[in-house]
Image (cartoon, rainbow, N blue to C red):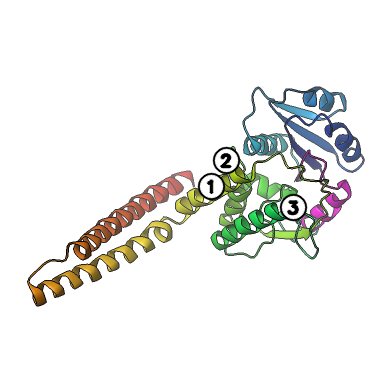
Amino acid sequence: MKIIVGIPAYNEQKNIASIIIKLKKNVNEIIVCDDGSSDDTNEIAKELGASVIQHKKNLGYGASIKSIFLKAKEMKADILVTFDADGQHRVKDIENIIDPIQKNEADVVIGSRFLNQESNMPKYRKIGIKTITGITNKTLGQKLSDSQSGFRAYNKKALTDIVPVETGMGISTEILIKASKNNLRIKEVPIVVLYEGDTSTHNPVSHGASVIFSTIKFTSIEHPIKFYGVPGISFLILGLIFIFWTLQLFSESGTIVTNVSLIGIGSIVIGIVLMVTATILYSIISVVREQSK
């Protein structure tokens, strides 16, 4: 079984050598995506025998993962493990990550920082990740503990069925949404993350915003009726209630209450726009899916 580890890296010359040396004892191939680094990340990875993808400029974490997916498929990987370059992941946890795939129990495996253990992650990051995971779970209809972990494993079917497009941090959620859409089996296993202070290179605000916008975008595409249609009906009903109230007040007093009538008209307009959007988007997506079959 061909196991490939993919490492997205941006200015990681201080960590990349030790990570590659440790990984070479456990896996068949190593892919490093140098995402426009200005240091020696690229040269070090090449000297140590890794297959290096080089972005001419910094494109983002998602772009790196996308390039790694494409390269892993080209190299005919049976299992791709994505592994962060910041030195926080333990190489020995790879065995736990790939085990459910080897046993044919899962297509996508997430290394959870919160599963069956107490994480020493900085508190503000823990709150942010749990919040994002909660939003992701509602979209997926699953109960994951760590939707944002970059330490994951994918089997050949997952690599074939999932085509990432996000360039930012939203790719973690995008991949899970597309895995769920394709009925891929998602499983979590516990991992240990080594925090020495806060070594994250990702801004928590931009990370959170990227993930939330990504979730909204892919949810609206995959479920347009639910995303636009249900709120549209709700606004339409609300508008009719306020219009009825306006007519009732007019019949009693002979005057129109402007605020009540405006709320009614506005709600009806919003409801109609949302319902038309849901119908058009659903039709377009249905046609695209039929043509792609």
Looking at the rendered structure, the secondary structure element under dot 1 is helix
Q: Name the residue located 81 percent from the left edge and 63 percent from the top edge.
A: 117
Question: Looking at the picture, which amino acid does disc 3 mark?
Answer: Pro
Residue 34 in the image, given as x and y percentages of width and height: 72, 29
Q: Are marks 1 and 2 in contact (CB under 8 Å)?
A: yes
Q: CA distance from mark 1 to mark 3?
A: 24 Å
Question: Which residue in the protein does label 3 denote?
Answer: 122
Looking at the rendered structure, the secondary structure element under dot 2 is loop
Q: Quadrant of residue 81?
A: top right
Looking at the rendered structure, the secondary structure element under dot 3 is loop
Residue 204 in the image, given as x and y percentages of width and height: 64, 45
Question: Looking at the picture, which amino acid does disc 2 mark?
Answer: Glu
**Is 97 contained in the magenta span?**
yes
Q: Name the residue located 80 percent from the left edge and 52 percent from the top edge.
A: 98
User: Range of the magenta residues?
Assistant: 81-101
Which residue is nearer to you in this view: 117 or 42? Answer: 117
Answer yes or no: is residue 163 visible. no
Q: CA distance from mark 1 to mark 2?
A: 8 Å
> Which disc, if any, is residue 166?
2
